[in-house]
Amino acid sequence: MDKIDELLQDESRINNVARDLEIKIREGESFESFRYRVSFAHLKKYGDALEATGLLSGKGDYHDFDESENAFAFALFIAHNESKDLVLEAEGDTFFHMSWDYYLEVLKKQGFRKVYSEEVSDIGRGSKEEFCLWFHDKKAILLEAESWDNKAVVNSTQIYYEVLFPKDPDQLDESYHGAFFETFLRHSSNGPIQDKNGNYIGRSFRLDAREGLVSHLDKIEKMGFKTSNPWRSFKDQFIYLVNYAEEKKSKGYRKSKSISLRKLLELPQDVKDKIGLTREEIFSQYVDTVSSKWVREWVTKSGTEGKWYYFNHDAKGILGKCLAVFNYLLPL
């Protein structure tokens, strides 16, 4: 590729990014000034320091960066994140590296209440952490959070919820699809779901809440989206409530699901009702944790889902287990 082709390709790339960001060149503005504005607008929107550096340098692949460009990209990454954290903190929003106490205060101000808590001890590190679940009653949002460094900072946090389409997605206009993608799909890989009655088209989410939680919740409301309360389809949520100490010991999906189900069963009844954790769904979830494939297939084929109080949950002692088995064998 000769020099002229490279210049044309570079100019085309800048113009394509500018169109995506809805940026137009000003009258009398030099192309280098335009490049500068486009590059930093891209950084502001997407937080990609490598791509921004590539736009500034005219190089399409970061593997082609020289030593000074690599150093610039790293410095740009640090500066961008620090400035973003300062803005988010000033707005009372969540940000990476925030303190544990700060985060819990944000949750309280946003209308969340703590519905489950456990202490996590790491003998090797000599630390005591907290793993907890919070719930937003109005929006039916379940949130998990885990501390780090003796409850100094946030280690991880996720929110789980459903958002509803106003009607069948095939009947929605392009502007709605665009807004929906920007608000939700960009952050999640789950596909649209339909509730059991066929009346709603919904969408289940698991979203990292370490950054911009407040602005995300505000955006849902301002753009006219509604969260599902109660959830229509618990089974379409992948709820993973394993703390970091359990994660070291748990091996495989079914063990992790069993741990998560145990914690879900300890939630207050009103929370279980709002996330759609019915007896039938608990039974279905429990069956999925059984390691034996033939047991799972037998339960499914025999149509016993929904015949719940088997020998797992609140049956205590030998007598309780016997009564649970008897109850399980009764016809629906």
Image (tube, rainbow, N blue to C red):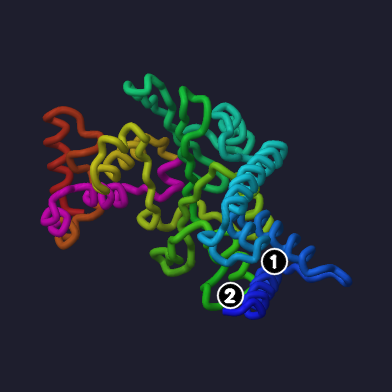
Q: Is residue 139 above or below residue 198?
A: above
x, y percent for residue 331? 17, 53
- What is the C-alpha distance between the residues marked 2 and 1? 24 Å
Which residue is nearer to you in this view: 123 or 241?
Answer: 123
Q: Is residue 283 magenta?
A: yes
Q: Which residue is mark 2?
A: 172
* Of the image marks 2 and 1, the number of the one nearer the N terminus: 1
In terms of secondary structure, what is the magenta stretch mainly?
A: helix
Quadrant of the image for the N terminus?
bottom right
Is residue 23 visible to the viewer in this orientation of the structure? Answer: yes
Question: Which residue is painted at 35% across and 39% down in the image?
Answer: 242
Q: Which residues are magenta?
A: 271-298
- Identify the amino acid type marked 1: Leu
Q: Does the CB distance between marks 2 and 1 fall below 8 Å?
A: no
Quadrant of the image for the C terminus?
bottom left
- Identify the amino acid type marked 2: Leu
Which residue is nearer to you in this view: 307 or 41?
Answer: 41
Which residue is nearer to you in this view: 72 or 295?
Answer: 72
Callout 2 environment at 10 Å: few (<14), some (14 to 19), or many (20+)?
few
Tell me the SS state at disc 1: helix
Q: Which residue is mark 1?
A: 21
